[in-house]
Image: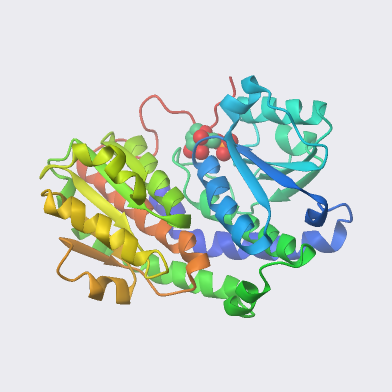
């Protein structure tokens, strides 16, 4: 399948994207000055929207910048007021998504500085933006986005570092990340891919499932949303992603022994909170699949039905590797169900109308 090939290509896609950015910034002079912004508005659809949600956590924590993330299909018709010193960031693999393009045109009519992250440099969104960053992940054939998503995260991470510097913020995190966070990510992504066989062996938990839940907190909350979307798109199993803290406000009513629950919980400052949510769903009979690192899996030995162990790395970088785990899980589940993984029913690669 193209999708599997594209999942496996991610170390190269990330390498190319980061190398390409290093050379772009030498040539461009009009890059966004994040120090001038009071607020950043991020706008996208689908998986690209979830990349934007991860970036919100990063921008707020590392660059001390207020960020709002909006679905392009809502933003374009809502036509919200735009601040005079705000900026807009559009994320689109194809660069042709009709709602995202319409949202860009609205923002431009309000004299916003419009930045975009695209995979297609000749696309409409690229042409109409004030400044463009490219993901260099190569063409993505599989309809479900995989390498485009992590490459978007790569660009966004770079922008966040730039913003942190310009705004003189988050320097302690930058220091903790060390000199080569990009290399750390690429190595960890490779290690995550090496778990493919193990992940394939646990899709039996979805054999009789008609519905599944993904839970995450903090920057892994968008990865829970993305995991649920991926599973829906290609396996047609109904799936929802929830912020783990939201569970008791409704979704917990859905839990029974037929519901697999995928808990995404690296050992970080929110880990204990997520584990208590995990225990709540397990007590109600759910089959719990824990995706965590070595320490997290060890601590939860008694509390989950199966484990996907991811490499340990700085919590800021977790979205890159946990994305790999949910992509592989969805992929193998769909293959097991015999669906058309590369061309799921009713879906188009680019939604241009
Ligand atoms: C947005 C998107 C994709 C998804 C699907 C439909 O596209 O939602 O994330 O995989 O193909 O469109 P884009 O604006 O990122 O090209």
Res. 322 visible in picture: yes
Q: Position of residue 239 (x, y in %)?
A: 29, 38
Res. 203 visible in picture: no
Q: Residue most toward the right?
A: 29
Looking at the image, which residue is at 51% across and 44% down? Answer: 50
Closer to the camera, 2 or 98? 98
Tally of marks: 0
Closer to the camera, 277 or 47? 277
Looking at the image, which residue is at 88% across and 52% down? Answer: 30
Colour scheme employed for the rendering of this structure: rainbow
Dividing the picture into quarters, in which one does residue 123 lie? top right
Closer to the camera, 80 or 102? 80
Q: Residue most toward the front?
A: 249
Closer to the camera, 165 or 321? 165
Image quarter in which the C terminus is found:
top right
23 horizontally vs 231: left or right: right
**Residue 53, above or below 289:** above
252 horizontally vs 31: left or right: left
Looking at the image, which residue is at 44% across and 63% down? Answer: 321
Q: Position of residue 220 (x, y in %)?
A: 43, 56
Q: Position of residue 36 (x, y in %)?
A: 83, 52
Q: Position of residue 2 (x, y in %)?
A: 42, 46
């Amino acid at each position: 399948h193209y999708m599997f090939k594209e999942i496996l290509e991610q170390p190269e896609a990330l390498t190319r994207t980061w190398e390409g950015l290093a050379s772009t910034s030498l040539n461009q002079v009009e890059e966004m000055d994040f120090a001038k912004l009071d607020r950043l508005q991020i706008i996208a659809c689908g998986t690209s929207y979830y990349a934007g949600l991860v970036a919100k956590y990063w921008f707020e924590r590392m660059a001390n910048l207020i960020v709002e993330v909006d679905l392009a299909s809502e933003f374009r018709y809502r036509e919200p007021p735009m601040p005079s010193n705000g900026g807009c960031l559009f994320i689109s693999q194809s660069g042709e998504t009709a709602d995202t393009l319409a949202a860009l045109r609205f923002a431009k009519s309000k004299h916003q500085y419009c930045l975009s992250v695209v995979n297609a440099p000749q696309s409409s969104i690229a042409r109409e933006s004030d400044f463009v960053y490219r993901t260099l992940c190569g063409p993505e054939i599989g309809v479900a986005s995989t390498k485009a998503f992590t490459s978007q995260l790569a660009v966004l991470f770079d922008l966040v570092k730039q913003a942190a510097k310009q705004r003189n913020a988050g320097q302690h995190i930058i220091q903790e990340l060390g000199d080569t966070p990009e290399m750390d990510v690429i190595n960890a992504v490779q290690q995550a891919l090496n778990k493919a066989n193990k992940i394939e062996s646990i899709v039996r938990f979805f054999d009789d499932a008609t519905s599944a839940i993904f839970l995450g907190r903090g920057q892994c909350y968008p990865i829970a949303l993305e995991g649920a979307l991926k599973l829906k798109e290609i396996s047609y199993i109904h799936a929802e992603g929830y912020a783990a803290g939201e569970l008791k406000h409704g979704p917990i009513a859905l839990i029974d022994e037929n519901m697999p629950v995928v808990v995404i919980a690296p050992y970080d400052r929110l880990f204990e909170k997520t584990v208590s949510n995990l225990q709540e769903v397990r007590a109600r009979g759910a089959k719990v699949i824990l995706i965590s690192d070595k320490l997290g899996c060890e601590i939860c030995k008694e509390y989950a039905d199966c484990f996907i162990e991811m490499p340990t790395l700085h919590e800021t970088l977790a979205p890159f590797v946990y994305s790999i785990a949910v992509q592989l899980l969805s992929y193998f589940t769909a293959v097991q169900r015999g669906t058309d993984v590369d061309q799921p029913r009713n879906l188009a690669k680019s939604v241009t109308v």
